[in-house]
Amino acid sequence: MAKSEARPVKTRIKKKVTGGSKPSSPKRTFWAPFLHIYQPRWQRPDILKQIDEECYRPLFRVIDGSPNARVTININGVLIDLLYEHNLGETVDLLKKLVNEGKVEVVGTAKFHPLMPLLPPDENRHQIDLNEITNTATFGTQWSRKGFFPPEMAISPEVLKTIQDAGYKWVIASGIACTDAWPTNIVHQLSSGFDIFYRDDYVSNDISFGRLDASGFVQKITHMYEDDSYIITAQDGETFGHHIKHAEQTFLKKVFEKIAKSDNVEICFISSLNTKFPVKKGKPPRPSSWSTDMQDIENEVYYPLWKNPDNPVHKIQYKLLSRVNKIIQMLDETQDPDLNNSNNGKLNMEYQDYKKTARHFYDSGISSCSFWWASMRPMWSPNLILNGMELLIKAAVNARLALVKVKNIESQELLEEISMYYSQLLGTITDMEAQRERVRLLPPDVLNEEDVDKLGKGRKNSNTVHE
């Protein structure tokens, strides 16, 4: 998806050469490109195949054909599963080849792409563990815990602690998160010993929105700073070929070719930056995502596309999610000794069946997509909102069915609350759609600010495009 134009807080001003003798050796710029590729568990097979044909395979082939390519990639485990399930395993095989040849490094993440600040720490760790199982099975010994991509670059102090406790060495965050002097030739390390790398939001957005061609990009990063420096760009991998048709050829391949001929620019993995630049203590980052802007920060709305207090759909979604979190936690903590009694074999089997089913639906249902499609900045799709919410409802129902077996009464109250919020959600979604339709029929000259907000500022409604 095209991210909103979040901006780093600190202004990065190119240092001017004011005269005197020229430096004895040319300065060098290290470009560390980062790509995030992901599809939700419920993605339609035809859309998945379209994206694979337009983006994933062509993108990986460009990297494969570029000797100097070094790309840090996050691929959520759920996408690896989907590619195999829909007979697209050749794409995964090509990615494995790139990893084995040292052209791609794969980072860790939360498998089903939840917005981590919205979840309890235990669930975030569970999602990390699930993704590690997939990465290890796919990439073997070529994968290890180095870098971590929190979905949507959504971070908080608690999320950073969970990631570091899981054994990772560094995390990538949006430039808007930086509260320190903008790092161009140092690597920031938190007091806990955890490295944090910041995406250059300006340049990344220029790429994502097609405002830079290959020549302009290479020229820009070559001349941004006087001294040796590095720059990290990060965007959805789907930018190249799916969002912008053939951009893997017209932009990425040409950039690789131009840099191959340059004495001043080198491509590198993010993981290698702390071997090229000194590591220094930095200030803690602010809670944010790569779709957060400064106005959001000032309003203390750190995750505006997923938890906006002014968004009536978000408010109900979050209440529903918090109750589902509770009933799943209740299920996880249930240890009834009767279930271990050999005389209760059938009861135990039914209990375990419902428990596994609840966990299955919950793990994939907490994807950030359902919240993103409710944001109206610019995304709005009732059907895609409900895709994830329905999985959460199934998770809650199966959790309750399991807990019935151990005569848990409190879970019934939780399920009733969840049912109430789901009913409210359906009503609110239909009300919002009706309001948007009413506003659409108004002549442009009578639209007021409130009307524009209901339309999501005139933005698109889609039922097929992935997050």
Image (cartoon, helix red, strand yellow):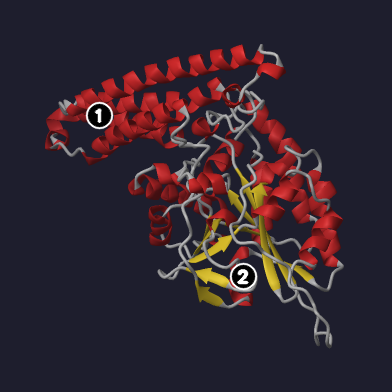
Can residue 282 be seen at all in this image of the molecule?
Answer: yes
Viewer-closest of 196 and 16: 16
* Quarter of the picture holding the N terminus: top right
Instruction: Tell me if residue 33 comes above or below residue 373 in the rendering.
Output: below
Viewer-closest of 257 and 61: 257
Q: Position of residue 52 (x, y in %)?
A: 70, 37
Rate crowding at label 2 as few (under 14), some (14 to 19) or many (20 or more) other CA atoms within 10 Å. few
- Name the side, left or right, on which 449 lies relative to 263: left
Rate crowding at label 1 as few (under 14), some (14 to 19) or many (20 or more) other CA atoms within 10 Å. many
Of badges 2 and 1, the one in the foreground is 2
- Name the side, left or right, on which 164 lies relative to 52: left
Q: How many labels, in total? A: 2
| Quarter residue 107 falls in | bottom right
In percent of the image, x 66 and y 37: which residue is there?
88
Q: Position of residue 427 (x, y in %)?
A: 44, 15
| Quarter residue 410 falls in | top left
* Quarter of the picture holding the C terminus: top right
| Quarter residue 16 falls in | bottom right
Q: Identify which amino acid the numbered label 2 is placed on.
A: Ser
Callout 1: SS: helix
Quote the CA–CA distance across marks 2 and 1: 48 Å
Q: Which mark, by number, is residue 279?
A: none
Q: Which residue is mark 2?
A: 272
The first of marks 2 and 1 along the sequence is: 2
Q: Which residue is mark 1?
A: 351
Q: Identify which amino acid the numbered label 1 is placed on.
A: Tyr
Viewer-closest of 38 and 9: 9
Instruction: Tell me if residue 145 comes above or below residue 38 in the rendering.
Output: below
In percent of the image, x 83 and y 47: which residue is there?
249
